Image (cartoon, rainbow, N blue to C red):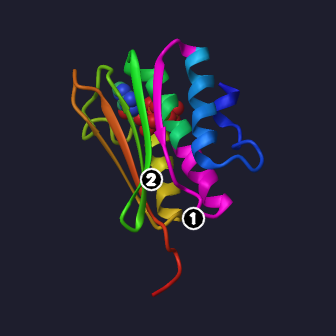
Amino acid sequence: MTGLRANPAAGKPLPQALGALARAFTSETGIRVRVHAFGGSELSSAAESEVYRIAGEALANVRKHAKATKVQIALRRRGARLVLEVRDNGIGFDPGAAAEVGHGITGMKERARLLAGRLGVTSRRGFGTAVMLAVPLSQAPP
Ligand SMILES: Nc1ncnc2c1ncn2[C@@H]1O[C@H](COP(=O)(O)OP(=O)(O)OP(=O)(O)O)[C@@H](O)[C@H]1O
Ligand SMILES: [Mg+2]
């Protein structure tokens, strides 16, 4: 699991860092991950690290809970935001009922808030889980 906790390799752009994270995850779990990652260069390296850690926490949940066979990671620019999605095809859960169970989702939301962004988890039993993060690319005050 240590690979999922590490910082992105020094100077590695976020898309490449996510690719490496996905490969480490697959080799540790056997779960296939498809990565479509572009952008992120507008973020500070501190902000990139937060996004990377959110992806790592989402993958930790896939590994621990999902019983998934496939994961998709997408990073793309959408208007003035950078959007990260981590989607699995696992067993899903009821997000309302699980709200207070652990620290992972709460921590991801706190990291999103530090970036002035938003994080949502959508899931339904039997239909997998999606974590979506949207971060504004311009964090300067208006
Ligand atoms: N990808 C997922 N697939 C299925 N269930 C999930 C998934 N992600 C989260 N869950 C459910 O949501 C709960 C809360 O997740 P959260 O990450 O906050 O806590 P945790 O993983 O149980 O504990 P921690 O992250 O503190 O080790 C989990 O216990 C699990 O029931
Ligand atoms: Mg967790």
Asked if the stretch drawn in magenta spans residue 132, the answer is no
User: Where residue 65 sits in the image (x, y, percent)?
Assistant: 41, 22
Q: Is residue 80 above or below residue 20?
A: below
Asked if the stretch drawn in magenta spans residue 46, the answer is yes
Q: Is residue 58 visible?
A: yes
Label 2 packing within 10 angstroms: few (<14), some (14-19), many (20+): some
Mark 2: C-beta under 8 Å from nearest atom of ligand 1: no
Secondary structure under tag 1 reads loop
* Amino acid marked by disc 1: Glu
* Amino acid marked by disc 2: Lys
Left or right: where 7 falls relative to 76 = right
Secondary structure under tag 2 reads helix
Q: Is residue 24 above or below residue 94?
A: above
Left or right: where 25 falls relative to 90 = right
Q: Residue at x 58, y 63 (%)?
A: 43
The alpha-carbon separation of the residues under discs 1 and 2 comes to: 21 Å
Stretch in magenta: 29-54
Label 1 packing within 10 angstroms: few (<14), some (14-19), many (20+): few
Q: Which residue is mark 2?
A: 109
Residue at the bottom extreme of this rendering:
142
Quadrant in which the N terminus appears = top right
The quadrant holding residue 125 is top left
Residue 42 bears which disc, if any? 1
Quadrant in which the C terminus appears = bottom left
Q: Is residue 141 above or below residue 99?
A: below
Q: Residue at x 36, y 65 (%)?
A: 79
For the image, the number of numbered tags is 2
User: Where residue 28 sits in the image (x, y, percent)?
Assistant: 61, 16
